[in-house]
Amino acid sequence: MVTRRNFLKRAAVASAGLAVGGIGAMSAESYGRVVGAGRKVNIAYIGIGNRGEQIIGDFEKTGLVNVVALCDVDMGAKQTQKVMAKYPKAKQFKDFRLMFDKIGNEFEAVAVATPDFSHFPIAMMAMAYGKHVYVEKPMARTFHEAELMMQAARKYPNVVTQVGNQGHSEANYFQFKAWQEAGIIKDVVSIVAHMNNPRRWHGWDTNIYKLPEAQPIPDTLDWMTWNCTVPYHDYNEKYHNGEWRSWYDFGMGALGDWGAHILDTVHEFLDLGLPYEINPVKLTGHNDYFFPASSTIQFKFGPRGEMPACDVTWYDGVDNLPPIPDGYGESALDPNIPVSGAGEIKKTTLNPGKIIYSKDLTFKGASHGSVLSIIPESKAKEMAAKLPEVPKSPSDHFKNFLLACTGVEKTRSPFEIHGPLSQMFSLGVMAQRLNAKFYFDSRTGQITNNAFANAMLTGIPPRKGWEDFYKI
């Protein structure tokens, strides 16, 4: 088992830029010089069922991985056995800490597809061991954890990081960048983001007054490790296999789940940073335990350079549609949205996406890699000749990460880019949980009008035995 002494020792060695257990801490530039662009990356997968299986398949399609290890808290479950059978030579672990301790010298990168609350300790350990990290979104569950992950990424500059908002390597990314550079997207004053499909917790009893009763823990499940840094919760099926996303203690709700696929380019290219005001305008079915049935959350951002102040308003819930501008037309649905345990996203009157209002133009877009269009159609036709050519993506999100590991490309959604967006989501979740408006001072990193909210930036202390993951 990884002890406090050897974990901190590994972190000290990695930060000095030395090779930890073989090639794991070599710089991306060194990889490129030594082995070239076509080398396979030795990788360990952590979280191999459900969404984990999907991203493992996407990595496999690149032809650039050599699977060294598989890690999951339930290696005997139906959802993990398929992947285990596909890679019979890969070493198997239930506890990621043991995997790093035992075979940390055999792999150079990890891909993490575990519940939101466990992203932080796994990523922190990986960076301390000098391993490149691909982690599914949202990057972290709390504001403080995202901050520490960004600090660690700066401390270990030889480590490549990538957050799994896959559209950040697709057409939406390159179009937004090209349109902004050409002056088509400018002077944005308001953004509406919407995700109005049913979620797992819709239909649950919002009069809840205690957590679900304990159920027998499945024989194959390491439930203690599943809980990792959060205070121990008795096992219940409503926490496991994707259901964790429903609960404040474990997940980030619809905002954390879908915001990264809708607001990522807006946040990066408009240099939004962190909001100064977060206001839960509407919460239906508010309770102390799981996410509201519907939420409207407004984030206010100040001026940035020559860009004006901007409001971002988030809508979720099947009965909570945003106002639709004249000439909106049909609502698109990205065809590449992966299936989840919450059910497939089905085309409805208004599909997941965004409406961007600038002083002169209005844009609409869907989620993930979908491109923007100018509305109404008459304005789009008028602007057609002025639109710049949009370059094609040289690599999808998975290949981009692997090529970055070998020094060929740079990742498009590293921790330093995605971290503030993850923190924005955590502020939104805090507003949902407290059902209160608060003001955030980005200069001091403090909430100025609500002591409870300010304490929630850090969150409750980690469970005993997990404290050292919070030390850099």
Image (cartoon, rainbow, N blue to C red):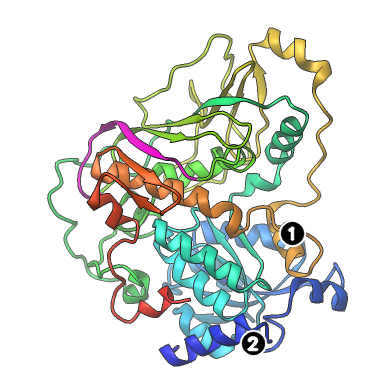
Name the amino acid type tagged 1. Answer: Lys
Name the amino acid type tagged 2. Answer: Val
Q: Residue at x 61, y 31 (%)?
A: 307
Placement of 311 over or under 469, stated as above or below = above
Q: Quadrant of residue 381?
A: top right
Q: Residue at x 38, y 45 (%)?
A: 440
**Residue 286 part of the magenta segment:** yes
Q: Quadrant of residue 26?
A: bottom right
For the residue carrying disc 1, how many other residues have a C-alpha within 10 Å: few (<14), some (14-19), or many (20+)?
some
Question: Foreground: 392 or 50?
Answer: 392
In this view of the protein, can residue 110 be seen by the observer? Answer: yes
Is residue 313 toward the left or the right of residue 23 in the image?
Answer: left
Tell me the element at label 2. loop
For the residue carrying disc 2, how many other residues have a C-alpha within 10 Å: few (<14), some (14-19), or many (20+)?
many
**Marks 2/1: CA–CA distance:** 22 Å
Residue placed under numbered mark 1 in the picture:
410
Residue placed under numbered mark 2 in the picture:
20
Task: Please tell me which of labels 2 and 1 falls first in the chain.
Answer: 2
**Residue 337 part of the magenta segment:** no
Q: Which residues are magenta?
A: 274-289
